[in-house]
Amino acid sequence: MSAGRAPFPSWTLRRGALALRVWELGDPDRPAGDRPPVICLHGWLDQGLGFARLAGGRAGRWIAPDQRGFGGSSTDALGGACYPHFADFVADLDALVEAVGTAVDLVGHSMGGTVAALYAGARPERVRRVVLLDGLGALPTSERSQLRRMRRFLAGQRRPPHLARMASVEQAARRLQERHPGLDAGHAALLARHGTRPAEPEGVRWSFDPLHLVRGPHPFHEEGFTEVLAAVEAPVLLLWARRGLYPPAFRERRAAHLRRRVERELDCGHMIPYERPVEAGDLVERFLAAPDGAPEIP
């Protein structure tokens, strides 16, 4: 995988002042039968190319947007004052599905899994299958005071966290591999090349919006999220990471709200698209290709 240029084409989805970069990772010359396009939604502080090894070159259309404020989908056009919430990511996905022009399959990792689940519950007619890679809603936090959360949010808005400067794209790639030991060197180079921007006075910094590091003002409501999960009509593959974010009892409690689900576990950490991209991609592809009457993994 070359670090010098992207091996995949991309295009721009415009939503008013916001421009979202969308990567085309699949191989259009290899037909996928009647299977609809697959939209891959990355996790927090990641980018669409996080799916480059999981989805890259697979048959059919595999689409991976840089979600707002990540990768090449900067919020600069909104004046640097846009703090995204899950509803914004879901609305962006709705616009992308509209642009694609047909029902889709969804694959979401971590935060992207939560977005995929919310959309599948809200728009069941637009989603055929769902795959959630260690991503089924936020974990509960110990901070339950709305007042303290709002005060911390306002302080973070006024003084967003500083993004560290790195000497080069190559250093950024090495830092990714240090943080994620299972990440392939070529994949790390690709992510660093397309997930950084020039820094002042020299070097590079990550391109995501620093506001993503500010804790949000609203708690994640368990009752509301499980109501959405119960409304999901599509078959769901839950692909858990053995050393992931979710304790077993928590997985079981959330998953119980999905009516049609298959569960598998991979021996890896939370970053499944980095650590087990080929194995996970094969499982995903087999699930998406299974007959409609049997949402299983052959």
Image (spheres, rainbow, N blue to C red):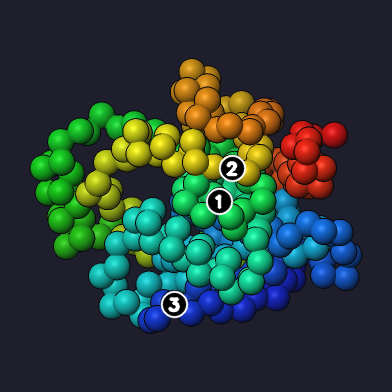
**Residue 124, which numbered label?**
1
The dot on residue 188 is none
Residue occupying image coordinates x 44% and y 41%: 228
Disc 3 target residue: 15
Identify the mark nearer the N-term, 1 or 2. 1
Identify residue type, mark 2.
Glu
Crowd class of label 3 (few under 14; some 14 to 19; many from 20; radius 10 Å): few
Name the residue located 55 percent from the left edge and 33 percent from the top edge: 258
Residue 71 % position (x, y): 51, 66
Q: How many marks?
A: 3
Q: Residue 233: which disc?
A: 2
User: x, y percentage for residue 176?
Assistant: 56, 51
Between tags 1 and 3, which lies in front?
1
Q: Is residue 186 visible?
A: no
User: Label 3 to label 2, Cα distance in Å?
Assistant: 28 Å
Q: Is residue 113 above or below residue 12?
A: above
For the residues bearing labels 1 and 2, Cβ distance under 8 angstroms: yes
Secondary structure of the residue carrying tag 2 is loop
Task: Indicate which label's residue lies in the foreground, 3 or 2.
Answer: 2
**Amino acid at circle 1:** Pro
Which residue is at 58% across, 32% downward? 259
